[in-house]
Amino acid sequence: MIHYLVYNITLICAISSAEVDSSSEARRHYAWGVRYEKGGLFEDALVQYKAAVSLDPENAKYRCALGELLYRLKEVRAAKDALLKAVDLDSTYIRTYYILARIYYDEAKYDSVIQMYRNILSLDPNRDDVRRSLAELYRYEGMDSEALHEFEVLLEDSPEDVGLLSAVGALRLKLGRLEEALEVYDMLARLRPGDRKVERTVARIKRKLGDYEGALKMYRSLAEEDSSDYEAFLEVLALSRRLSRREEEVWALENLIRLKPKDTRFMAELAGVYIDEGKLDKARKLLDRGLKLAPDDGALLVMSGEYYWRKGERGRALEEYRRASADPRWKEYAERMILTLRAEMEQEKLKEERQKEEEFFRRGRRGS
């Protein structure tokens, strides 16, 4: 009996010693593999990593090292097998997910890349580089809400990061969260004074939110800073009309004509404003200039008709409206003006005839 117990104890010790020796040998091979890999001796490193795995097949770190080197050697399928086995052995070994993410990215399997990034962040939420990559990938895949969430998490720790603010602002704007987007772009405008793209975005959001005064102020500032900014002048024109700001409307039109000297549309519009304000000489000069460029332009001819009507030259006004009616865009309006003008001329004629009759009868009564 004693001999039997001694035999069992000896056997257990031998097995334990073999396990210790096996693990120790695996560590030795792994260490050599790391040295070889650092020295650029990749094939030798591969032999060492494989030896470590064969001696300690349940060690996720060894399998991950093997998988990473196989990937480096472009043996992708074998690399993936080794890495997935490492995940099965230890789902908390974070390095494995990094390598798998790179493999899946190369294969354009972005759903799998996203899952790898999520796995990394579930193990270590402070990996900002991974969170940023995840946010960008969400954005690339059109998952705007998910991307925005990740960018906002990053922004909490870096509230003045211009790149993060730009991403958050753009996504909030895209998702229709205008008030929140405006907060971000206001911050960007403070951090980057003079950034016209940011200022233009602020102006656009203000307009969408119905803050026409604020939008007009922003667009006017943009136009004053750059007198060649055609789009800014267009916005000033539209907003000044909405707010009935005649002075700024004229300013915008004058500058649009300066920028587009052959665009007769703005000439006709400004001439109309001048006529409304009684500045007939200015209107006539502008109309003559436009009609030299486009003699058959309906808008200019209509305004020319308005000019002559205001001057009391109804015959010339009528002729201008007739010419304008040849332009399909202005045909209906011009014909309506012709009818109105003829009716007015008829009324004037009848009035004159009545006055003549009355004068005739007055004279007759005096003579009798």
Image (spheres, rainbow, N blue to C red):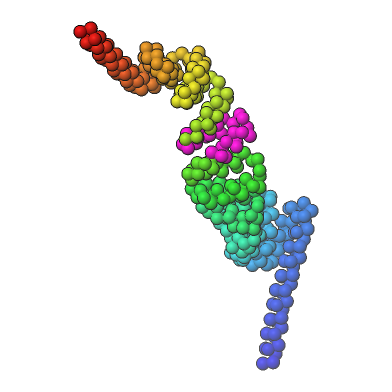
Q: How many labels does the image show?
A: 0
- Quarter the C terminus occupies: top left
Q: Point out residue 27 in the picture as x, y percentages from the top left corner.
A: 74, 66
- Quarter the N terminus occupies: bottom right
Magenta stretch: residue 351 in it? no
Locate residue 297: give its quadrant. top left
Q: Point out residue 312 in the picture as x, y percentages from the top left corner.
A: 40, 16
Instruction: Please give the name of the residue rendered at 64% of the width and 54% of the height, measured from the top-left corner.
Output: 159
Of the pair 162 and 365, the residue shown nearer to us? 365
Of the pair 172 and 40, the residue shown nearer to us? 172
Q: Is 292 positioned to the left or the right of 59 in the image?
A: left
Q: Point out residue 43 in the picture as x, y percentages from the top left corner.
A: 73, 53
**33 in relation to 212, above or below:** below
Of the pair 279 and 237, the residue shown nearer to us? 279
Instruction: Please give the name of the residue rendered at 61% of the width and 55% of the height, measured from the top-left corner.
Output: 155
Instruction: Please give the name of the residue rendered at 38% of the width and 16% of the height, measured from the top-left corner.
Output: 321
Magenta stretch: residue 218 in it? yes
Extent of the magenta region: 216-243
Predominant secondary structure in magenta?
helix
